[in-house]
Image: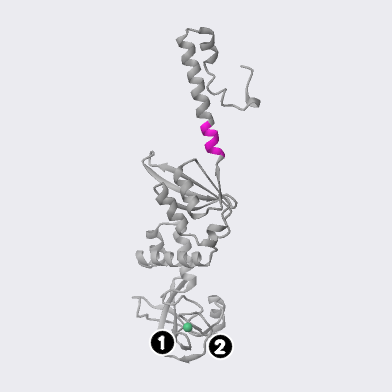
Amino acid sequence: MNSIFNQLLNVKGVVVETVRIVDSPLRPEPVLEVRVRPRKGILRCSRCGKRRHGYDQGGGVRRWRHQDFGCWRVELVAMMPCVDCPGCGVVVASVPWAEPGSRFTRDFEAECAWLMTVADQKTVSGFLHVAWRTAGDIAHRVADRLRADMPSPFDGLTAIGVDETSYRKGHTYITVVVDHERRRVIWAHDGYGRDVFDLFFRQLTDEQKASIKVVTGDGARWIDSCVREHCSNAERVLDGFHIVSWMSDALDKVRERLWNQARHEHDEETVKRMRGVKYAVLKNPGDLTDR
Ligand SMILES: [Zn+2]
């Protein structure tokens, strides 16, 4: 039976010693208690993560909540070995089924974190029978671990774009920075202007700044001065969206002036011809109809 539970746990480096249904010090109802130990020879220091020789069993008995098995709560129980680490001293070993310091197995935490992405915290805590705050803490821990394993979105940037946009009916502004090459948003922050864009560059290493060759955006001076200060090698490029939008505004002003002029001069013919021309002048020649 131990070997079946070994397969059910599906964690490398775990040896199942006994399985039984007993009262748990942590819960009012009996639990399925799986006594385990890390396989010898794979002990690692819980501080630096390096492979170390075992020292003793001085870490005491610990319990970890694992995913339920049918209607039973499952707890892993192990005597914690200590390791003798030249860098960290005699410290408790890390175990292959859980993160250092956690009372939950890694599989339990992963399930909880995934559920939090598709359901609200109250539902998840009720479903997994954990405290509301615990569900949130677990999700944060898992997210931090995943983030630490991910390559930085600031590595290898060559062309970035910056723009400010408003939400809440134009009352609140945020600044957004995109990576043109990988076509994704890499940074966003409340507010706009030099001080805000400056915060973005402060998160970058010198090497990351140096790889940026192009910065697109509108013609705002705060973009110019930030780019000059932080990546002087980069070329400032006005982005297509703003150029088209300025050209359209300029064309519309010309149209308005001609229209007013024609009306002042009582030039009925021109006024008639100009009527409805607003959208025609903004169209591509190929899209124009005969009218
Ligand atoms: Zn160590």
Per the rendering, the mark at residue 59 is 1
For the point 55% across and 34% down, the residue is: 244
**Looking at the picture, which amino acid does disc 1 mark?**
Gly
Image coords of residue 17 (percent x, y): 50, 86
Element carrying mark 1:
loop
Q: Does the image show residue 153?
A: no
Snapshot quadrant of residue 32: bottom left
Inspect the magenta stretch and tell me whether residue 243 lies in it.
Answer: yes
Image coords of residue 79 (percent x, y): 44, 87
Q: Which residues are magenta?
A: 240-246
For the point 48% across and 53% down, the residue is: 229
For the point 35% across and 80% down, the residue is: 25
Per the rendering, the mark at residue 145 is none
What type of secondary structure mainly makes up the magenta span? helix
Image coords of residue 217 (percent x, y): 51, 44
269 lies left or right of 62? right
**Looking at the picture, which amino acid does disc 2 mark?**
Gly
Residue on which the image places disc 2? 41
Q: Does the image show residue 274?
A: yes
In the rendered view of the protein, which quadrant contains the N terminus? bottom right
